Image (cartoon, rainbow, N blue to C red):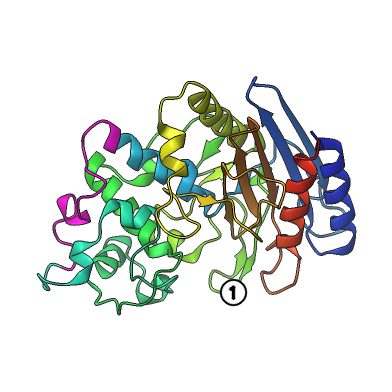
Amino acid sequence: MGFARATTVIAAHLQRTPIPGAVLGQVLADGSRRTWSCGQRETGDDAPGMETDTWFDLASLTKVIFTTERILAHAAAGRIDLDAPLISVIPDLHQYHAGSWQRQVTFRDCLGHRTAYPAVEPIYTYGSDPATLRAFVLQRNWQPGPQVYSDINFILLGIALERLEGRTIHQMELAPGLSFAPPADQTAPTEACSWRGRVMRGEVHDENCYALQGSGHAGLFGTIDGVLDFASGLLDRHAAQDGHCALLLTPLRDTRGHGWELAHEGWHGGSAASARTIGHTGFTGTGLWLDLDRGCGWSLLTNRVHPSRHVETEILDLRRAVGEAILED
Protein backbone atom coordinates (compact mmCIF):
# COMPACT_ATOMS: atom_id res chain seq x y z
CA MET A 1 0.00 0.00 0.00
CA GLY A 2 1.08 3.58 -0.60
CA PHE A 3 2.47 4.82 2.69
CA ALA A 4 5.43 6.50 0.99
CA ARG A 5 3.10 8.19 -1.49
CA ALA A 6 0.99 9.50 1.39
CA THR A 7 4.04 11.08 3.07
CA THR A 8 4.81 12.91 -0.17
CA VAL A 9 1.24 14.20 -0.31
CA ILE A 10 1.45 15.50 3.27
CA ALA A 11 4.85 17.16 2.84
CA ALA A 12 3.63 19.01 -0.26
CA HIS A 13 0.44 20.10 1.51
CA LEU A 14 2.37 21.52 4.46
CA GLN A 15 4.49 23.56 2.08
CA ARG A 16 1.48 25.48 0.78
CA THR A 17 -0.87 25.72 3.78
CA PRO A 18 -0.57 27.07 7.36
CA ILE A 19 -0.65 23.62 9.01
CA PRO A 20 2.53 23.54 11.18
CA GLY A 21 3.19 19.79 11.10
CA ALA A 22 1.75 16.32 10.87
CA VAL A 23 2.24 12.73 11.94
CA LEU A 24 1.06 9.80 9.82
CA GLY A 25 0.66 6.22 10.96
CA GLN A 26 -0.49 3.00 9.35
CA VAL A 27 -1.18 -0.40 10.90
CA LEU A 28 -2.04 -3.67 9.17
CA ALA A 29 -3.96 -6.72 10.33
CA ASP A 30 -0.69 -8.62 10.90
CA GLY A 31 0.31 -5.98 13.47
CA SER A 32 2.98 -4.29 11.37
CA ARG A 33 3.00 -0.51 11.43
CA ARG A 34 4.75 2.51 10.02
CA THR A 35 4.92 6.05 11.38
CA TRP A 36 6.31 9.29 9.98
CA SER A 37 6.42 12.94 10.97
CA CYS A 38 6.85 16.18 9.06
CA GLY A 39 7.02 19.91 9.74
CA GLN A 40 7.10 21.73 13.06
CA ARG A 41 5.19 21.33 16.29
CA GLU A 42 4.16 24.99 16.25
CA THR A 43 4.67 28.23 14.37
CA GLY A 44 7.90 30.20 14.64
CA ASP A 45 11.38 29.99 13.17
CA ASP A 46 12.85 28.26 16.22
CA ALA A 47 9.94 25.88 16.83
CA PRO A 48 10.79 22.24 17.53
CA GLY A 49 10.24 19.74 14.77
CA MET A 50 7.21 17.47 14.81
CA GLU A 51 8.14 14.02 16.15
CA THR A 52 6.36 10.68 16.05
CA ASP A 53 6.07 10.71 19.86
CA THR A 54 4.31 14.10 19.92
CA TRP A 55 1.00 14.19 21.79
CA PHE A 56 -2.05 15.59 20.00
CA ASP A 57 -5.42 16.87 21.14
CA LEU A 58 -7.58 14.22 19.46
CA ALA A 59 -10.78 16.28 19.77
CA SER A 60 -13.77 14.28 18.46
CA LEU A 61 -11.75 11.10 18.09
CA THR A 62 -12.66 10.94 21.79
CA LYS A 63 -16.15 9.96 20.64
CA VAL A 64 -14.99 6.71 19.03
CA ILE A 65 -11.75 5.79 20.82
CA PHE A 66 -13.13 6.42 24.31
CA THR A 67 -16.88 6.99 24.61
CA THR A 68 -18.28 4.61 21.98
CA GLU A 69 -16.01 1.77 23.10
CA ARG A 70 -16.90 2.26 26.74
CA ILE A 71 -20.65 2.49 26.11
CA LEU A 72 -20.58 -0.64 23.96
CA ALA A 73 -18.57 -2.49 26.62
CA HIS A 74 -21.23 -1.67 29.22
CA ALA A 75 -23.89 -2.91 26.78
CA ALA A 76 -21.99 -6.13 26.08
CA ALA A 77 -21.71 -6.73 29.81
CA GLY A 78 -25.48 -6.31 30.22
CA ARG A 79 -25.28 -3.15 32.30
CA ILE A 80 -27.25 -1.10 29.78
CA ASP A 81 -29.59 -1.76 26.87
CA LEU A 82 -28.64 0.32 23.84
CA ASP A 83 -32.31 0.66 22.93
CA ALA A 84 -33.33 1.81 26.38
CA PRO A 85 -33.74 5.56 26.97
CA LEU A 86 -30.93 7.44 28.66
CA ILE A 87 -33.23 7.94 31.66
CA SER A 88 -32.55 4.31 32.57
CA VAL A 89 -29.17 5.61 33.78
CA ILE A 90 -29.87 9.37 34.01
CA PRO A 91 -33.38 9.47 35.53
CA ASP A 92 -33.14 13.23 36.09
CA LEU A 93 -32.76 13.99 32.37
CA HIS A 94 -35.30 16.77 31.66
CA GLN A 95 -36.99 15.66 34.86
CA TYR A 96 -39.54 18.48 35.02
CA HIS A 97 -41.09 17.50 31.67
CA ALA A 98 -42.23 13.88 31.94
CA GLY A 99 -43.48 13.63 28.37
CA SER A 100 -40.63 15.42 26.63
CA TRP A 101 -38.86 14.01 23.59
CA GLN A 102 -35.55 14.17 25.46
CA ARG A 103 -36.69 11.49 27.88
CA GLN A 104 -37.27 9.13 24.94
CA VAL A 105 -33.74 9.41 23.52
CA THR A 106 -31.85 6.10 23.64
CA PHE A 107 -28.17 5.23 23.89
CA ARG A 108 -28.26 3.99 20.30
CA ASP A 109 -29.87 7.24 19.16
CA CYS A 110 -26.96 9.19 20.62
CA LEU A 111 -24.33 6.84 19.16
CA GLY A 112 -25.87 7.24 15.70
CA HIS A 113 -26.55 11.00 15.94
CA ARG A 114 -30.22 10.43 15.25
CA THR A 115 -31.60 12.80 17.89
CA ALA A 116 -33.13 16.28 17.67
CA TYR A 117 -30.28 17.96 19.58
CA PRO A 118 -28.41 20.86 17.94
CA ALA A 119 -24.95 20.27 16.50
CA VAL A 120 -23.20 22.37 19.13
CA GLU A 121 -23.95 24.92 21.83
CA PRO A 122 -21.55 27.29 23.67
CA ILE A 123 -22.22 25.62 27.02
CA TYR A 124 -19.09 27.20 28.49
CA THR A 125 -20.71 30.63 28.27
CA TYR A 126 -23.44 29.68 30.77
CA GLY A 127 -21.23 29.34 33.83
CA SER A 128 -17.95 28.04 35.23
CA ASP A 129 -18.99 25.28 37.64
CA PRO A 130 -18.86 21.86 35.91
CA ALA A 131 -21.65 20.38 38.06
CA THR A 132 -23.94 23.27 37.23
CA LEU A 133 -23.09 23.00 33.53
CA ARG A 134 -23.96 19.29 33.57
CA ALA A 135 -27.27 20.19 35.15
CA PHE A 136 -27.78 22.82 32.46
CA VAL A 137 -27.26 20.21 29.73
CA LEU A 138 -29.69 17.81 31.42
CA GLN A 139 -32.44 20.29 32.24
CA ARG A 140 -32.36 22.72 29.32
CA ASN A 141 -35.46 22.74 27.15
CA TRP A 142 -33.54 22.01 23.95
CA GLN A 143 -35.57 22.98 20.91
CA PRO A 144 -35.88 19.95 18.61
CA GLY A 145 -34.36 20.19 15.16
CA PRO A 146 -33.27 17.92 12.30
CA GLN A 147 -31.01 14.95 12.94
CA VAL A 148 -27.43 16.23 12.74
CA TYR A 149 -24.02 15.24 14.01
CA SER A 150 -24.21 16.62 17.55
CA ASP A 151 -21.71 17.06 20.36
CA ILE A 152 -24.66 17.08 22.77
CA ASN A 153 -25.27 13.39 22.03
CA PHE A 154 -21.83 12.47 23.31
CA ILE A 155 -21.86 14.92 26.19
CA LEU A 156 -24.93 13.01 27.39
CA LEU A 157 -23.20 9.66 26.83
CA GLY A 158 -20.28 10.94 28.88
CA ILE A 159 -22.62 11.86 31.73
CA ALA A 160 -24.12 8.37 31.46
CA LEU A 161 -20.64 6.84 31.78
CA GLU A 162 -20.01 8.88 34.91
CA ARG A 163 -23.29 7.67 36.42
CA LEU A 164 -22.60 4.03 35.46
CA GLU A 165 -19.07 4.00 36.85
CA GLY A 166 -19.47 6.35 39.79
CA ARG A 167 -16.47 8.47 38.85
CA THR A 168 -15.56 11.36 36.60
CA ILE A 169 -14.32 10.83 33.08
CA HIS A 170 -10.88 12.04 34.06
CA GLN A 171 -10.72 9.24 36.66
CA MET A 172 -11.35 6.52 34.07
CA GLU A 173 -8.39 4.42 32.98
CA LEU A 174 -6.79 4.75 29.57
CA ALA A 175 -4.40 2.62 27.54
CA PRO A 176 -0.76 3.70 27.09
CA GLY A 177 -0.40 6.46 24.53
CA LEU A 178 -3.74 8.00 25.49
CA SER A 179 -4.28 10.62 28.20
CA PHE A 180 -6.54 13.37 29.46
CA ALA A 181 -3.50 15.27 30.82
CA PRO A 182 -0.49 14.85 28.53
CA PRO A 183 2.90 16.43 29.20
CA ALA A 184 2.53 19.97 27.92
CA ASP A 185 6.10 20.21 26.68
CA GLN A 186 5.57 17.16 24.46
CA THR A 187 2.17 18.20 23.10
CA ALA A 188 1.45 19.97 19.82
CA PRO A 189 -0.23 23.27 20.74
CA THR A 190 -3.63 24.13 19.35
CA GLU A 191 -5.35 27.50 19.28
CA ALA A 192 -4.48 30.83 20.83
CA CYS A 193 -7.79 30.94 22.69
CA SER A 194 -9.39 34.37 23.07
CA TRP A 195 -11.64 33.13 25.92
CA ARG A 196 -8.81 31.64 28.01
CA GLY A 197 -6.21 34.18 26.93
CA ARG A 198 -3.44 31.72 26.05
CA VAL A 199 -2.30 29.12 23.56
CA MET A 200 -3.71 25.71 24.44
CA ARG A 201 -0.78 23.39 25.10
CA GLY A 202 -1.64 20.13 26.84
CA GLU A 203 -5.05 21.60 27.73
CA VAL A 204 -8.13 20.59 25.78
CA HIS A 205 -8.95 22.86 22.87
CA ASP A 206 -12.72 22.32 23.03
CA GLU A 207 -14.22 25.03 25.23
CA ASN A 208 -17.20 22.97 26.40
CA CYS A 209 -15.05 20.03 27.42
CA TYR A 210 -12.70 22.39 29.26
CA ALA A 211 -15.60 23.97 31.17
CA LEU A 212 -17.15 20.57 31.98
CA GLN A 213 -13.75 19.30 33.17
CA GLY A 214 -14.16 16.13 31.15
CA SER A 215 -16.75 15.09 28.61
CA GLY A 216 -17.69 12.29 26.26
CA HIS A 217 -17.33 14.36 23.09
CA ALA A 218 -13.73 15.62 23.36
CA GLY A 219 -10.76 15.83 25.72
CA LEU A 220 -8.67 12.80 24.81
CA PHE A 221 -5.02 13.25 23.83
CA GLY A 222 -2.89 10.66 22.11
CA THR A 223 0.34 9.83 20.36
CA ILE A 224 0.30 8.16 16.97
CA ASP A 225 1.25 4.86 18.60
CA GLY A 226 -1.58 5.20 21.11
CA VAL A 227 -4.05 5.72 18.27
CA LEU A 228 -2.58 2.86 16.20
CA ASP A 229 -2.69 0.52 19.22
CA PHE A 230 -6.42 1.18 19.41
CA ALA A 231 -6.83 0.64 15.66
CA SER A 232 -4.84 -2.59 15.84
CA GLY A 233 -7.14 -3.84 18.58
CA LEU A 234 -10.17 -3.26 16.36
CA LEU A 235 -8.50 -5.06 13.44
CA ASP A 236 -7.77 -8.00 15.76
CA ARG A 237 -11.38 -8.12 16.90
CA HIS A 238 -12.56 -8.02 13.30
CA ALA A 239 -10.25 -10.91 12.41
CA ALA A 240 -11.56 -12.87 15.39
CA GLN A 241 -15.13 -12.24 14.18
CA ASP A 242 -16.32 -11.31 17.65
CA GLY A 243 -19.10 -9.14 16.22
CA HIS A 244 -17.84 -5.82 17.57
CA CYS A 245 -16.75 -4.38 14.23
CA ALA A 246 -19.91 -5.68 12.57
CA LEU A 247 -21.84 -3.57 15.08
CA LEU A 248 -19.68 -0.53 14.31
CA LEU A 249 -20.50 -1.00 10.61
CA THR A 250 -24.24 -1.31 11.20
CA PRO A 251 -25.94 1.80 9.78
CA LEU A 252 -28.09 3.80 12.16
CA ARG A 253 -28.80 6.67 9.75
CA ASP A 254 -27.53 7.71 6.31
CA THR A 255 -23.72 7.67 6.74
CA ARG A 256 -23.56 6.96 10.47
CA GLY A 257 -23.03 3.74 12.38
CA HIS A 258 -22.43 3.25 16.10
CA GLY A 259 -20.21 6.24 16.81
CA TRP A 260 -18.33 6.03 13.52
CA GLU A 261 -18.85 7.55 10.10
CA LEU A 262 -19.38 4.99 7.34
CA ALA A 263 -17.66 5.21 3.96
CA HIS A 264 -19.60 7.25 1.44
CA GLU A 265 -19.00 9.45 -1.57
CA GLY A 266 -17.09 12.62 -0.74
CA TRP A 267 -16.18 11.67 2.82
CA HIS A 268 -12.88 12.41 4.58
CA GLY A 269 -11.52 8.89 4.07
CA GLY A 270 -11.16 9.22 0.31
CA SER A 271 -12.66 7.41 -2.66
CA ALA A 272 -10.41 4.33 -2.53
CA ALA A 273 -11.87 3.00 0.74
CA SER A 274 -13.98 -0.14 0.58
CA ALA A 275 -17.63 -0.11 1.61
CA ARG A 276 -16.57 -1.70 4.90
CA THR A 277 -14.52 1.27 6.07
CA ILE A 278 -15.19 3.35 9.17
CA GLY A 279 -13.61 6.63 10.14
CA HIS A 280 -13.83 9.70 12.29
CA THR A 281 -12.19 13.10 12.42
CA GLY A 282 -11.36 15.64 15.09
CA PHE A 283 -11.78 19.41 14.77
CA THR A 284 -8.17 20.09 15.77
CA GLY A 285 -6.97 18.29 12.62
CA THR A 286 -6.92 14.63 13.57
CA GLY A 287 -8.45 11.54 11.99
CA LEU A 288 -8.57 7.75 12.10
CA TRP A 289 -9.86 5.31 9.47
CA LEU A 290 -10.07 1.50 9.27
CA ASP A 291 -10.67 -0.37 6.02
CA LEU A 292 -11.80 -3.70 7.41
CA ASP A 293 -11.86 -5.45 4.03
CA ARG A 294 -8.20 -4.61 3.47
CA GLY A 295 -7.16 -5.08 7.09
CA CYS A 296 -5.63 -1.59 7.17
CA GLY A 297 -5.93 1.30 9.58
CA TRP A 298 -4.37 4.74 9.22
CA SER A 299 -4.30 7.94 11.22
CA LEU A 300 -3.34 11.48 10.26
CA LEU A 301 -2.65 13.76 13.22
CA THR A 302 -2.18 17.51 12.76
CA ASN A 303 -2.70 20.64 14.81
CA ARG A 304 -4.28 22.55 11.95
CA VAL A 305 -6.01 24.99 14.37
CA HIS A 306 -2.66 26.38 15.57
CA PRO A 307 -2.53 29.28 16.06
CA SER A 308 -6.10 29.90 14.82
CA ARG A 309 -9.08 27.96 13.49
CA HIS A 310 -10.00 30.95 11.33
CA VAL A 311 -7.68 30.17 8.43
CA GLU A 312 -8.10 27.87 5.44
CA THR A 313 -5.96 24.74 5.67
CA GLU A 314 -7.72 22.55 3.08
CA ILE A 315 -7.75 19.74 5.65
CA LEU A 316 -10.59 17.89 3.89
CA ASP A 317 -8.58 17.70 0.67
CA LEU A 318 -5.54 16.50 2.60
CA ARG A 319 -7.44 13.77 4.40
CA ARG A 320 -8.97 12.47 1.18
CA ALA A 321 -5.65 12.50 -0.65
CA VAL A 322 -3.90 10.67 2.17
CA GLY A 323 -6.60 7.98 2.29
CA GLU A 324 -6.40 7.46 -1.45
CA ALA A 325 -2.61 7.27 -1.35
CA ILE A 326 -2.52 4.87 1.61
CA LEU A 327 -4.89 2.45 -0.13
CA GLU A 328 -3.35 2.57 -3.58
CA ASP A 329 -2.13 -0.82 -4.83
x, y percent for residue 99: 11, 71
x, y percent for residue 61: 53, 49
- Drawn side of residue 280 relative to residue 244, left or right: right
- Drawn side of residue 297 relative to residue 11, left or right: left
The kind of secondary structure element at disc 1 is loop
Q: Which segment is the magenta one? A: 75-94
Picture layout, residue 287 above or below residue 113: above
Give the residue at x 65% y 19%: 30
The amino acid type of the residue labelled 1 equals Ser
Give the farthest residue toward the front.
275
x, y percent for residue 104: 19, 63
**What residue is disc 1 on?**
194
Residue 217, image quadrant: bottom left
Picture layout, residue 160 above or below residue 328: below
Residue 296, image quadrant: top right
Location of the C terminus (image quadrant) = top right
Q: Main secondary structure of the magenta part?
A: loop
Residue 211 visible: no
Total numbered labels? 1
